[in-house]
């Protein structure tokens, strides 16, 4: 009984040795971390942009939550248009704010470049607008 090898239970979590033995596990792990880091950078870029235009913490929180609420409504509208067989609705829904900030959610199931393009556009636009606002502020 003691010292005998135990067969793995179906559905149990893999051991660290099994994870390291799998040839694709290290690239998948690095890709997962990269996806979450870029998603966090998108959130930080939006928060930085909001904080440069709004002067209070409450204003930043309410402003970002309001923008995300509008984005959720827009994605709901695109979903309805997609169900009504409007051809461009699915493509337009891929470039919404929430879809870009949720780029990491399905990366292991398949590559969805639209999510990462939307995330890159969010980061670039927020950083450019934040830099412009910061340069116009008399901080230095």
Image (tube, rainbow, N blue to C red):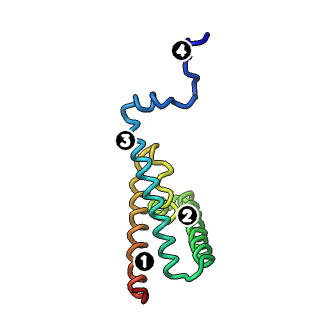
Is disc 2 in contact with disc 1, using a CB cutoff of under 8 Å?
no
Tell which circle, 3 or 4, labels the residue nearer the N-terminal end. Answer: 4
Tell which circle, 4 or 1, labels the residue nearer the N-terminal end. Answer: 4
Frontmost of labels 2 and 3 is: 3
Tell which circle, 4 or 2, labels the residue nearer the N-terminal end. Answer: 4
Tag 3 secondary structure: helix
Tell which circle, 2 or 3, labels the residue nearer the N-terminal end. Answer: 3
Please give the residue where the numbered disc 3 appears in the rendered image.
27
Real-space CA distance between mark 2 and mark 3, rounded to the nearest whole angstrom: 32 Å
Is disc 4 in contact with disc 1, using a CB cutoff of under 8 Å?
no
Give above or below for 59 relative to 108: below
Frontmost of labels 4 and 1 is: 4
Give the camera-side residue of 82 and 120. Answer: 120
Q: Quadrant of the C terminus?
A: bottom left
Q: Within the image, what quadrant is residue 83 found in?
A: bottom right
Real-space CA distance between mark 3 and mark 4, rounded to the nearest whole angstrom: 30 Å
Report the residue at 43% width, 86% height from top: 139
| Rendered image: mark on residue 5 | 4
């Amino acid at each position: 009984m003691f010292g005998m090898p135990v067969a793995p239970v179906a559905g149990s979590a893999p051991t660290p040795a099994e994870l390291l033995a799998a040839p694709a596990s290290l690239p998948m792990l690095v890709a997962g971390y990269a996806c979450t880091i870029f998603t966090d950078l998108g959130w930080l870029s939006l928060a930085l942009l909001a904080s440069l235009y709004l002067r209070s913490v409450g204003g930043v929180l309410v402003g970002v939550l309001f923008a995300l609420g509008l984005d959720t409504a827009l994605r709901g509208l695109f979903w309805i248009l997609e169900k009504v067989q409007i051809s461009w609705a699915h493509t337009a829904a891929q470039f919404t704010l929430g879809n870009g900030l949720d780029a990491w959610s399905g990366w292991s199931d398949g590559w969805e470049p639209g999510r990462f393009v939307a995330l890159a556009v969010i980061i670039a636009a927020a950083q450019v607008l934040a830099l412009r606002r910061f340069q116009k502020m008399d901080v230095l």
